[in-house]
Amino acid sequence: MNKTLYIDNFTFWMENDTEKLPDVSFIPPMLRRRMSILEKIAISLASKIAPDISEYKTVFASRFGEWEQTIKLIRQFYTAHEMSPAGFSNSVHNAAMGHLSLLTHNKNSYTSIAGGETTIENALLDAMLADTPVLFVYAEEKNPEDYTNALNGPVLSHGCAILITTKGTNKYELISNNEKLSALSFLDLKEVLQNGTDIKTSGWILSKKQ
């Protein structure tokens, strides 16, 4: 595996004391009211990276997906023995990208990936191997309290968007790697892109070229 690509635009966001959600005021109110927290995070970040571009493939990544929507459906089924069709449509893993494609009128393909601890690196590899411009979007919403003990720690709402192209200024080389490394985390990805250093995973290395 050896490929040249360019990353000239990216953004990162994480929930804090003053900002529980990134800006979503640009989304039409009727659509915004129907959207989940995860969808709002993903679409807000995507809009910062590619506001005027609609001709790109999209790769969406989320390890946990629609926590809130899925739990609502399970509780509804347990108490009422039925599920809301609208709620179900917002619980599937590709819901965020479906709404994004409608907002941007993007008729190109999109992929939604969940890969456990290696979700970010698996989805990013899928995006980098494409031969066309790709918008990579990763998002997680805050975990429900009932699940905190099952995780390594609480998950805050966070996400990023990266535009990967076939030409540009910031050139990278994608090569294979057989070294055993820990999974690529959100904070790892943020640090290496902001500092312009290499991204290393167990399967591949993305090396910045001068």
Image (spheres, rainbow, N blue to C red):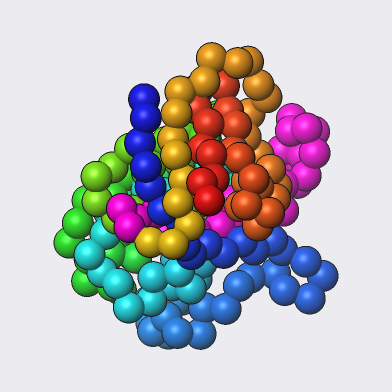
| Residue 12 horizontal/vertical position (percent) | 61, 61
Name the residue at 46% across, 45% down.
172
In the image shown, does 169 or 156 lie closer to the viewer? 169
205 or 21: nearer the viewer: 205
Report the residue that reaches farthest toward the left.
107
Q: Nearer the viewer, residue 109 or 121?
A: 121
Q: In the image as oriented, which residue stretches furthest toward the front? A: 210
Label count reads 0
Give the magenta part as a residue range: 140-167
Residue found at x 74% / y 33%: 151
What x and y, as percent, mark residue 114?
A: 46, 35
Task: Kindly identify the residue that appears in the image at 53 percent across and 51 percent down.
Answer: 210
As drawn, 164 above or below 25: above
**Whole-percent x, y for residue 150 in the image:** 74, 30
Q: Is residue 95 left or right of residue 77?
A: left
The stretch drawn in magenta includes residue 151: yes
Task: Place residue 199 in its image quadrant.
Answer: top right
Quarter of the image holding residue 11?
bottom right
Which quadrant holds the N terminus?
A: top left
Residue under the image location 46 percent in, 23 percent down: 176
Q: Residue 55 magenta-drawn? A: no
Residue 121 can be seen in this image: yes
Res. 143 visible in picture: no
Percent of width and height locating residue 104: 28, 72
Residue in the foreground of this view, choosing between 87 and 180: 180
